[in-house]
Image (spheres, rainbow, N blue to C red):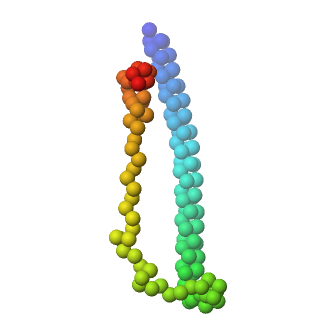
């Protein structure tokens, strides 16, 4: 009897070791994936910082003024007037949504038989 108990405990121990090894392997894979995602996030943050620096360089007032002076005749740019600024009352109201056909949704209700609904129509 003792022999069977010992053999069973050894089998349980081997299964436990195998599951711990498998878990360790999965954790290492997840840690590698996490490190990869963190590297990607840092690359994207660097790209965003670079794009923000480029945007601020392109939007310098002196540069924009030089472009306006150089291409003003071609673009026919004019200063903004007060009449061009609208109010919230000038924005049209959103149209009402179209009516919804409820029969499209009743087919997915549990306990509802779509065939009997079709036959009733």
Residue sitting farthest toward the left: 89
Percent position of residue 104, x then y:
43, 34
Q: Quadrant of the N terminus?
A: top left
Residue 100, compared with residue 114, is above or below; it is below
Asked where in the image residue 94 lies, by quadrant, the reply is bottom left
Residue 104, compared with residue 99, is above or below; it is above
Percent position of residue 5, x then y:
45, 14
Left or right: 81 in relation to 67: left
Residue 92, compared with residue 12, is above or below; it is below
Percent position of residue 85, x then y:
41, 79
> What residue is at 41 percent from the left and 47 percent from the top?
98
> What residue is at 63 percent from the left and 88 percent from the top?
73
Percent position of residue 17, x then y:
52, 30
> What residue is at 38 percent from the left and 36 percent from the top?
102
Q: Quadrant of the C terminus?
A: top left
Asked where in the image residue 87 lies, by quadrant, the reply is bottom left
Residue 61 vs residue 120, the one in the foreground: 120
Residue sitting farthest toward the top: 1
Residue sitting farthest toward the front: 121
Q: How many marks?
A: 0
Q: Is residue 101 visible?
A: yes
Left or right: 100 in relation to 66: left
Residue 119 vs residue 39, the one in the foreground: 119
Left or right: 93 in relation to 79: left
> What residue is at 58 percent from the left and 76 percent from the top?
54
Q: Is residue 113 visible?
A: no
Left or right: 101 in relation to 37: left
């Amino acid at each position: 009897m003792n022999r069977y108990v010992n053999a069973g405990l050894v089998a349980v121990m081997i299964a436990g070791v195998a599951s711990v090894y498998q878990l360790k392997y999965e954790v290492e894979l997840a840690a590698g994936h996490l490190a990869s995602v963190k590297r990607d996030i840092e690359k994207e943050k660097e790209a965003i910082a670079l794009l923000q620096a480029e945007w601020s360089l392109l939007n310098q007032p002196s540069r924009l003024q030089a472009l306006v002076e150089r291409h003003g005749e071609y673009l026919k740019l004019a200063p903004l007037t007060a009449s061009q600024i609208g109010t919230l009352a000038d924005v049209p109201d959103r149209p009402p949504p179209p009516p919804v056909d409820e029969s499209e949704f009743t087919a997915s209700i549990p306990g509802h038989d779509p065939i009997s609904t079709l036959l009733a129509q």
